[in-house]
Image (spheres, rainbow, N blue to C red):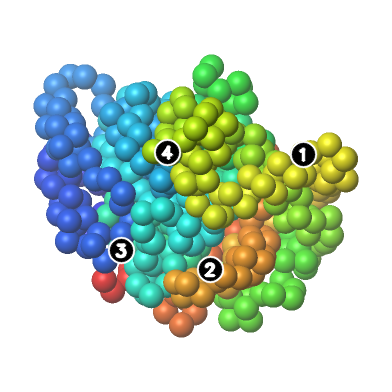
Amino acid sequence: MNFTAHGLKNMILNREIKVEEVVKLYLDRIDSLDCKVDAYLYVSSEEALKRAKELDKKLVSNEKKGGLFGIPISIKDNISVAGMQNTCASKMLKGYISPYDASVIERIKQEDGIILGKLNMDEFAMGSSTETSYFKTTKNPWNLEMVPGGSSGGSAASLAADEALLSLGTDTGGSVRQPAALCGVVGLKPTYGRISRYGSVAFGSTLDQIGPMAKNVEDCALLTENIAGLDNKDFTTADVKVSEYTNILTDDIRGKKIGIPKEYFGEGLNSDVKKCVEKAIDVFRQNGVKIEYCALPLSTYSLAAYYIIGCAEASSNLARFDGIRYGYRSKDYADAIDIYTKSRSEGFGDEVKKRIMLGTYVLSKGYYDEYYKKALKARNLIKREFVDIMKKFDAIICPTTTDTAFKIGEKQKDNISMYLSDLYIVPSNVTGVPSISIPCGMVNGLPVGMQITSNYFREDLLFNLAYSFEQSTNWHNLKPNI
Ligand code: GLN
């Protein structure tokens, strides 16, 4: 299938294709392919077809048509859709049905988007490969022996395999951008406060953002403009105007200044990935951008700060899963404490337990100052460094990941190397600035992603820079042979 979301919307509005036909095409595709890719945990065929028929009626009425009219969208299984499961890929929430819509889902529905189903992910969004899912491991559509990345691996794979046109993931420490890079699609981690998180299951509350994903920049901008903005149900959302990103999209980026932080091109970076990103930087030069090397020495401490802050917040957020209010409850227990202990021991997987223990430790008396408070101080310094660098540059560019997709099982026992692969992506969560990952090359048949980061609330600039690159290259049009 060769649709783009913006193109398909126009085809539907021009009555060249019916929404019902579109939904059937996608459901058939999922039916025939997802047994190989394993992107979906739940396919909402009935609801999607019902909605499609309603929209086909709306099409011939005078009613106003929404900004996502008829576009099939897939949703990570930690974002609530009323009446559908919301498992976070955990045994803890197996069988849990969400009673309400997240704010982003409300907006998608208002804008006439179609929800195709819920996607696999790392358990509670902790991981970089979807291997920590309790249910299954999603495969990378470019090579089914490889991981799709994570934690939003189902989202990225569903796009790369053409099993959806738009997708929502969440990004606490790179979980939208890393799988986007490994699957050759576009993923945005918006500014902290740009998109409401009401109805997404909290992991690290000062880091989490819901991130729009798509197969090209214009589609990503389309989804973003339809879901972003102030939400009185999430007090961390900011009252900053949301531009109509698709209307102001331009590939004229002459005169912009981009910084290349040398720390992000050093040790640990695969030399072929490095070459791809360097070539991509040349494309920006040709498009009239001024490129200069720069230094971000403090940002290299982001990874350490992230794993302390992220675990601390996770240990507190996940305390609610106690086997009493909802979620998994152990069959066999003596008293209340026993319910907590057994339900949590049996309901959570190893990676989640490890983070809860680490987080509890860094918050405990005697260690709080040494670890947690220190990480917060580091975070402040890293933020200041970013604010300063953004006075000199419009954006900075680096690889999204240190390497291309790795083999399923390869890093499962080597946590440190899995954590280290988050090196370039966590600074944006620690500081709150927006970053986008776009495809910029191929190495041994696997996609390479480039990350562009800008100042707070300058998603418009990210889209334009990314769009100009896309207009000059063909990477986003490549498709896996599946
Ligand atoms: N790899 C990161 C982690 O395991 C991803 C977290 C996220 O963004 N949800 O913490």
Residue 204 horizontal/vertical position (percent): 62, 39
Residue count near mark 4 (Cα–Cα under 10 Å), binned few <14, some 14–19, many ≥20: few
Query: Between 374 and 273, which is closer to the camera in this rendering?
Result: 374
CA gap, disc 4 to disc 3? 37 Å
Residue matched to label 3: 37
Look at mark 2 in the image and give the residue it sits on.
412
Give the residue furthest to the front: 334
Tell us which disc is closer to us: 1 or 4.
Answer: 4
C-alpha distance separating marks 3 and 1: 39 Å
Residue identified by numbered label 1: 363
Residue 92 position, x and y percent, is 44, 41
Say few, some or many: other residues with alpha carbon within 10 Å of mark 1 (under 14 / 14 to 19 / 20 or more): many
Sequence-first tag of 1 and 2: 1
Which three-letter amino acid code belongs to the residue tagged 4?
Answer: Asp
The residue that label 4 is drawn on is: 332
Between 365 and 295, the residue placed more toward the observer is 365
| N-terminal-most mark, 4 or 2 | 4
Residue type (three-letter) at the residue carrying disc 1: Leu
Task: Identify the image quadrant of residue 268.
Answer: bottom right
Relative side of 362 to 217, left or right: right
What is the distance, in whole Å, between disc 1 and disc 4 at their CAs? Answer: 31 Å
- In front: label 3 or label 1: 1
Density class for disc 2 (Cα within 10 Å; few <14, some 14-19, many ≥20) is some
Residue at the spot x=17%, y=61% of the render?
32
Q: Position of residue 16 (x, y in %)?
A: 13, 44
The answer to whether 416 appears left or right of 25 in the picture is: right
